[in-house]
Amino acid sequence: MKRSFIREILEAIDEETISFAGGLPSLNLFPTQDLKEATIKVLDNPKIYQYTVSNGINELREQIAKRYSDEGFPTTKDNILITTGSQQAMYILAKFFENKDITIEEPSYLGAMNIFRLNKLKMQGVKLENDGVNISEFEKSFKNTKLTYLIPDFQNPSATTYSQEKREEITKIVEKHDGILIEDSPYSELFFDKKMPYISAKLPKNSFHLGSFSKTLVPSYRIGWIRADEEKIKSLLIIKESIDLHSSGVSQYILAEYLKDTQKYEKHLQSIRDDYKAKAEYFSKQLKLIMPEFKHQLPKGGMFLYGTFGDNIDTFALVQECLKKKVVYVPGNQFYIDKVPNGEIRFNYTHSNFEQIEKGIKLIKSCL
């Protein structure tokens, strides 16, 4: 096992470094005043400081369940398990499926891949195309593994959005082989134009759907969740209790109070979408102007922009030079099972302002 390259990079940089590496939300968009008011309202209640139930407080699970139901995915609080971030959700699931084979996208989320390795899941990579996984490769792998981990909405790292056609094909394949889908959706609310339906909604008995408040509200509360069939939630709860008994009660109560005003939350989500869309478009524009040899697609949402220099540049070697000039990104080889150097890069555009975006791209260009 090796540490996450992204976490190591975050520790190696200082405040002068322009970072396109971590998936960090914009500091300017945290709803600090609204969260402060919610915090003040709950602080006088002594129960927020006590141990609480392992599956999460009722109020918060009911609020999350209602959002699913309102989108046409019938859900109750008993279908929800609160976790300490979606990273813990993935660890719980990896422990649940320990030693099994699993079909994943390539490239895929580095954090999930490390968890799968730690829990001895044998990963089978399937090529990711512009509109989702290659369907023929996916079925060939899935009929053997009967377990898959996918990020259909603004995928990390590629920013790919699955088409409606591929979502339907995946649904059919999972049903045909009576397998299990782990659908990771931390970015689904960060759409620029429209929200796509969850694949899990058509597979309520054969899916685990992962969500998080880290990308839509604040990461430091460390609150995520798993949505699944009630019996599966009971099984996962046993694993959860062996890790931390329960996720932060204070964070849960603050979030539950804040989410009472749904209009306020929706307004906040829209402000994030508007800001991130403008930054994504600006980042893409600057890449075309300053570094046209880097080929990429404009994302439809999320926090990342992904592309490649082709076979001529080793972006892992390049980032070592970029570090000296105080600009960083994540080289694409980190998102593959075998980690062979390649010309791909994942850029995060949400944490930087326009000036930093332009300056950072120029610094990378100077290192080429």
Image (spheres, helix red, strand yellow):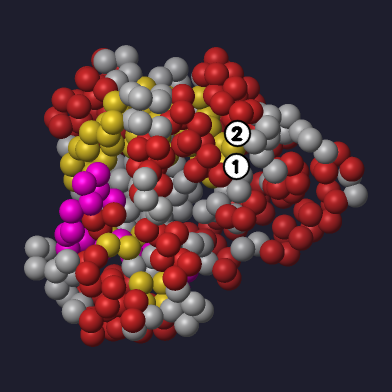
Query: Which mark is drawn over residue 5?
Result: none
Gap between marks 1 and 2 measured at Cα: 10 Å
Q: Secondary structure at mark 1?
A: loop
Q: In the displayed structure, does residue 251 sit left or right of residue 286?
A: right
350 in magenta: yes
> What is the x, y in percent for residue 314?
17, 66
Is residue 106 shown to the viewer in this render?
A: yes
Q: In the displayed structure, does residue 224 sit left or right of residue 147?
A: right
- Callout 1 touching callout 2 (CB < 8 Å): yes
Residue holding disc 1: 84
> What is the x, y in percent for residue 311?
9, 63
Amino acid bearing label 1: Thr
> What is the x, y in percent for residue 191?
42, 52
Residue holding disc 2: 243
- Specify start and end residues of the magenta stretch as a single range: 335-354
Amino acid bearing label 2: Ile
Q: Residue furthest front?
A: 1
Q: Secondary structure at mark 2?
A: helix
Compare residues 304 and 122 and report the one nearer the observer. Answer: 122
User: Few, some or many C-alpha atoms within 10 Å of disc 1 (few <14, some 14-19, many ≥20)?
Assistant: some
Asked if residue 30 is positioned above or below residue 213 in the image, the reply reads below
Asked if residue 101 is positioned above or below residue 60 in the image, the reply reads above
